Image (spheres, coloured by chain):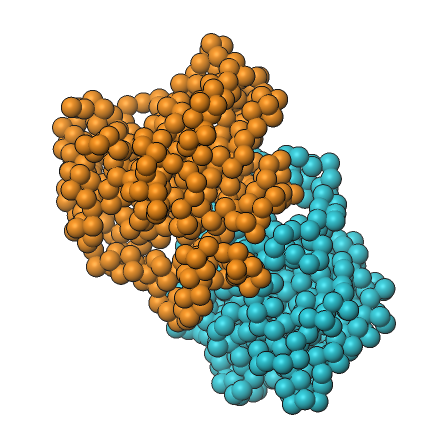
Chain colours: A orange, B cyan
Amino acid sequence: MLSALDLARRIEAGDLSASGVINLCADTIAARETEIGAFVTYDVEKARSCAAPSGSRALRGLPVGIKDIFDTADMPTQYGSPIYAGCRPAWDASAVSLVRRAGGVVLGKTVTTEFAYLQPPKTRNPHNLAHTPGGSSSGSAAAIAAGMLPLALGSQTGGSVIRPAAYCGVTGFKPSYKLIPTVGMKCFSWSLDTVGIFAAGVADAALAASAITGRDLRVDRTTPAPPRIALLRTHIWDEASAPMQNAVEHAVRMAEKAGAQISELTMPPALVQAFDAHPTIQDYEAFRALAFEFDNHRERLGLLLRTLLEDAAGITADAYDVARRNARRARHALGDLKSEFDVILTPSAPGAAPDPSSTGKAIFNRLWTLMGTPCVNVPGLFDASGLPLGVQVVGRFGRDRDTLEAALFVENALSRFAA
Amino acid sequence: MLSALDLARRIEAGDLSASGVINLCADTIAARETEIGAFVTYDVEKARSCAAPSGSRALRGLPVGIKDIFDTADMPTQYGSPIYAGCRPAWDASAVSLVRRAGGVVLGKTVTTEFAYLQPPKTRNPHNLAHTPGGSSSGSAAAIAAGMLPLALGSQTGGSVIRPAAYCGVTGFKPSYKLIPTVGMKCFSWSLDTVGIFAAGVADAALAASAITGRDLRVDRTTPAPPRIALLRTHIWDEASAPMQNAVEHAVRMAEKAGAQISELTMPPALVQAFDAHPTIQDYEAFRALAFEFDNHRERLGLLLRTLLEDAAGITADAYDVARRNARRARHALGDLKSEFDVILTPSAPGAAPDPSSTGKAIFNRLWTLMGTPCVNVPGLFDASGLPLGVQVVGRFGRDRDTLEAALFVENALSRFAA
């Protein structure tokens, strides 16, 4: 994989030109894109012409992949749907403009599932082509894993950043709700949609998050302090595979060995209720956010999404309001626990990547999307067949830097005590 | 003015055809649009062909104007900016789709100020062409006031629904934050942007809000109960003109005479702080929401907006976070007062419509936009020169129906005890 931090340092030191970085990506794309299918479109020549060699912006010259759910004025945008084949918006999404402001170079649009929902896309898992890369940010995760890009944008409404990051063995960072603007990103659920970042390691993702938000989120300049970690098996621990359960428990042991303070958290009842509230909120909003497509192009929607929207038509405003109240209660309940730990450690997914007939399940992610808390998939563990297993670090709302530091601590612990 | 409720009843009773309603609008447009300039574009023939004569949807056959800040697939969308001249998105904004789902017929796009900010547009006030209709939903308010439309959509980030409604003497309803989706509406500030509705009277606006949201918000079927009203002069009472101060105090007396319970509220310090927080939040977000336009088309931005964005570049994340914290505190402070009154009564604007060199000030609106509370401009009062003066009913977050009922109560009281 390509470390964004490493590339940035080499560019800064003059050891690598912006064009050289693009060549690194282009070579890997040439070698692997045919079998992986991470891109909807990419343009190496254009990227070369955009890669400003001067200046000191944090992402200067770094190629970035943009999930094709974000509008781009200079590249097609089709949201994974035939309804928008060849569509070219007249603007860039805010997150894309912020990447460019920071010196990043948009190399291509990465594959998304249809409107970032569940229909499996063409993309394959770089670790094993017989497996899904996960979804909905399938192309962004796969492109990082294959070393085709150092950075990519994605989005998460259920588990669309953390899950593909886990399946592909890369870092996925879902910041606090609204830390990165969703303006110009195709909406599925306005209460849940969150822009996320893919990178090789935690410190790479933190570099990008810092550059995009203009906040001090970098974690590469100091050694992270040992965090207080709460192991949370959740009420659906049985749905995690044995290798995943082992991976989480192993990560906890390694973190403890590295000096972290470990406790165990039982799933508070308010969080169980919020877990159930997520689909109500998501689907109620999707029926409205995708009203144009449902009302005018229903026959061109995939079966999974069409069925979801047909069912969503029956969700009442009362049911939606109850779900939102339950979510608010859960946020307070979670806030009340803040003195007990810095971060939660929990599975990123039910297990390793399943076969490509689905993109996997978001059951270990959707609660945290609804809570709006920062989440990081920490890679570094694998099952017996060599497929990645991701563990998830969940921080407190608005404490994105603390969360990234804790994730870096876990990442370091895993690599330091690797078998 | 055209009452949406009255038209809906006549259509229902078979006394008026959908085509007849469109003719009513078309005749007034033909007579007055040249001098008022409420529309960017309109299409009477198309509207005629869309006006479904059958079915029982709540807005069946009612013509609706759409502020040109909402995307429409079948009409140009240019956000009041030359950057987007001739732009035609591939989709409808959610609010537009919801209007159509409810049976409403999009008759045209109404004039917005540039990106819904402050640059004065071409539109004139139907009550006196030498005055502004207010902004930024200038065309929507003017079209209702002139009787060119029974319903129109607008949006408010500072005071862009309530202020033009007040200046034009129509009902403006800014619902609770996010009650109507902003998906497909050009974003200025994602924490503030709120979709609003313009109509002749309060019950007309409630009909539309009910139809668009699928919530029970209609207030035309029962007599509203006398509300507990808190008169709030605010800390900027001196900035209200004498006629406006008199209008608010008159409205309070009339409401009391009609049976309302009146108290007086002194501006809580947390609300004064939140008043100051509004521009920080708005401008910080606008610098990101309009990043594409600022970075790529700066020379085509109006001077007011360009200056705002240049200054906004200097707002730090810390300042933004402090402003958001202050807003949250104020929401709690406001919530703590909920046992004392049902609604607040306060000015809708500093006075009557000023001359067209500006669109007026949002100082009596921006706090409530930030609080996310439902607000209604109640028309019915005038200054000595015959220009409308609006009084504002502010309800509790999520209590949109109660707020509309209280506004209807005030509206009835003003007409019942009119001098």
Q: Residue at x 79, y 56 (%)?
A: B122
Q: From the viewer's perspective, is residue B146 above or below residue A63?
A: below
Image quarter (top left, top right, bottom left or bottom right) of the N terminus of chain B: bottom right
Q: Residue at x 15, y 23 (%)?
A: A419
Residue B243 visible in the shown view: no
Against A169, is B308 above or below?
A: below
Nearest to the observer: residue B15 or residue B371 = B15
Horizontal side, residue B21 vs residue B331: left or right: right
Q: Nearer the viewer, residue B126 or A179?
A: A179
Instruction: Please state the horizontal and vertical placement of residue A300, each as a whole percent of the image.
Output: 53, 56
Q: Quadrant of the C terminus of chain B?
A: bottom right
- Number of on-image labels: 0
Residue at the image point whose x is 21% and y is 27% from the top: A413
Q: x%, y% of residue A95?
A: 52, 39
Drawn side of residue A331 relative to residue B288, left or right: left
Q: Nearer the viewer, residue B195 or B76?
A: B76
A381, above or below B43, in the image: above
State left or right for residue B100 relative to residue A364: right
In x, y percent, where is residue A97? 56, 36
Quarter of the view holding residue A78: top right
Q: Nearer the viewer, residue A228 or B229?
A: A228
In this orientation, does residue B212 appear?
Answer: yes
Residue B294 spot, x, y in % from top left:
64, 37
The part of the image, by quadrant, that contains residue B333 is: bottom left
In the shown orientation, is residue B85 left or right of residue A67? right
Q: Residue at x 70, y 79 (%)?
A: B18
Q: Is residue A408 depicted above or below B410 in this figure? A: above
